[in-house]
Amino acid sequence: MELNEPLRWLLGRLAALLIGAAVLLVVYRIGLGAIHRFVPAVITAQATHLPSGSSSADEVGKRIGTIEDLLIKLLRGAVLAGLLALALAVFELWTVLAAIVLLIVAVVFATKDVVLDYVMGFLLLVEGPFFKGDYVVIRDHAGAEGVVEEIGLRRTLLRDALGSSHAVSNGYIRLSSNLTRMFSVAVVELHIPHAGELDRALAIAAQVAGEMREEAPWADRILADAPTDIWVTGIGMDGASIRLQQRVATGTQMAVASELRRRLAAALVSASIGTGRWDTPMPIVSQPVSSP
């Protein structure tokens, strides 16, 4: 029994669709392998020609992860678009395909903001002010900060300390601060109400920081070749202010600063040096008693 003409037409189109899908799958697998093979090689070769101290293994890894992530998403999108175009072409739905293409072009170029997002996304990837895994602060009207989870051509995803995910359009990123580029800085602020105890407090701060950089696991987080900077940042009616800064490995500044504060508080209490009104006895002034 011979198949009728419509059924033969349908089976022929399905066979062509399956063959095309198989070819696209092979292209996708080859593309994935090429991305994982060539991107690390190119980025690593580029890093070796940069001036000493301008890059690190951690920075190279972040750049590789960022570019690989974007290229894989673009490859996946291209394969899905090719599959859709193949299906429309196989079933001769050319008018539908043309309408989809025109709709995409109209949506992309309908507003200058969308074009700006893509242009800025391209510049972010080329210039590399931050990469996936960096902690950044967007200081423009976007007003977001957090760990970079994804850098796309249109928007960047940030995850803040509370776990909230922020999607920032790349066109809004004009001023960004990367807190984990090459190294981070642990900052501790101290207030000494009695300026006469300033020298002792400075000595204790230096001692605590020196002891901490020799102990595990903090020795691996504090950069060995970076000195501890201790400054007197102000003197006023309420006493003196001290700032302690220490260069640390990227992403460890909060943990190091927290431990420094804990140790400094214990050391200052042991030395009977107050850091605020809550632990500093205030003088008691007796008031004259008026006679009746």
Image (cartoon, grey):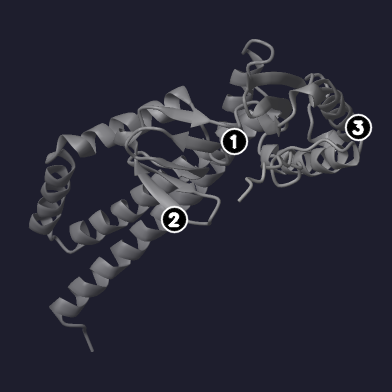
Residue 42 placement, left or right of 109: right
SS assignment at label 2 = helix
Nearer the observer: mark 1 or 3; the answer is 3
Looking at the image, which residue is at 26% across and 58% down? 84
Q: CA distance from mark 2 to mark 3?
A: 58 Å
Can you identify the residue that label 2 sits on? 25
**From mark 2 to mark 1, how far is it between C-alphas?**
28 Å
* Mark 3 lies on residue: 211
**Residue lying furthest bottom:** 1
> Quick check: 255 left or right of 112?
right
Q: Residue at x 24, y 61 (%)?
A: 87
Query: Is 155 placed above or below 49 here?
Result: below
Q: Which residue is mark 1?
A: 62
Element at badge 3? helix
Amino acid on which disc 1 is placed: Lys
* Disc 1 to disc 3, C-alpha distance: 32 Å
Residue with the most extreme front position: 292
Residue 102 x %, y %: 11, 47
Q: Are marks 2 and 3 in contact (CB under 8 Å)?
A: no
Q: Residue at x 38, y 40 (%)?
A: 143
Mark 3 crowd level (few <14, some 14–19, many ≥20, 10 Å Cα):
few
Q: Nearer the viewer, residue 194 or 211?
A: 194
**Viewer-closest of 124 and 73:** 124
Tell me the SS state at disc 1.
Answer: helix
Q: What amino acid is labelled 2 in the image?
A: Leu
x then y, percent, for residue 243: 69, 26
Of labels 2 and 1, the one closer to you = 1
Q: Is residue 79 left or right of residue 30?
A: left
